[in-house]
Structure formats: C-alpha cells, structure tokens
Amino acid sequence: MVKAIIISVVLLGLGIAGMCVRIIVKKNGTFHSQDVGQSKAMHERGVGCTRSQDRQAQRGNPLRLKVNDL
C-alpha cells in the first residue's frame, strides 16, 4: 500500500516536471493560451469565445435577461 502511494507520488512529480520543462528551461517561458477566443486556428474556423457569441446572440433578443433587473 505504501509502496503504491510512493510510486504514484513519484509519477505525478515526473509528470508535473515534464509539463514544466518548457517554462523552466526557456527564458520568459509560458504555457500557450488555451482560451478559444485567443486561438488563431479557431478564428480561422469561425469559432469564437462562448461568452462573446452568447452576447452577440442576445443583443437583438427582446426577451433577454437583463442582469441589472435581477
């Protein structure tokens, strides 16, 4: 039981270290943004941020919920 916990902690540590190699090694390294609104490939496909698309869809809707009225 203890051996399994130690092995799992070591594997988790290796996994986290592996994901951080780029940040640790590269000067000013960062993860790429995972946000759909900032993805060039998604913009090319016509997919935008969910919040922005919802806001655009609700803009002309007379039955929309108005946050200030709640």
Image: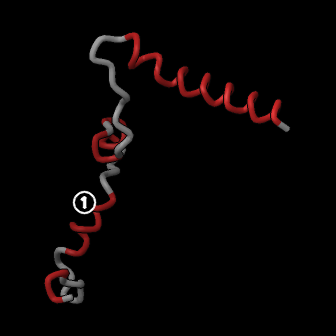
Q: Nearer the viewer, residue 22 or 14?
A: 14
Label 1, residues with CA under 10 Å away: few <14, some 14-19, many ≥20: few
Q: How many marks?
A: 1
Residue at left offset 23%, top offset 75%: 58
Could you say where residue 62 lies in the image, as x and y percent from the top left?
18, 87
Residue at left offset 21%, top offset 66%: 56
Q: In which quarter of the image is the C terminus?
A: bottom left
Could you say where residue 35 lies in the image, as x and y percent from the top left?
34, 44
Residue at mark 1: 52
Q: Nearer the viewer, residue 50 or 2?
A: 2
42 versus 29 height, above or below: below
With 18 as the anchor, is 48 left or right in this view?
Answer: left
With 40 as the anchor, is 55 left or right in this view?
Answer: left
2 versus 36 height, above or below: above
Residue at left offset 24%, top offset 60%: 52
Q: Which amino acid does label 1 sit on?
A: Ser
Which image quadrant is residue 63 in? Answer: bottom left
Task: State the residue lying farthest toward the left.
Answer: 68
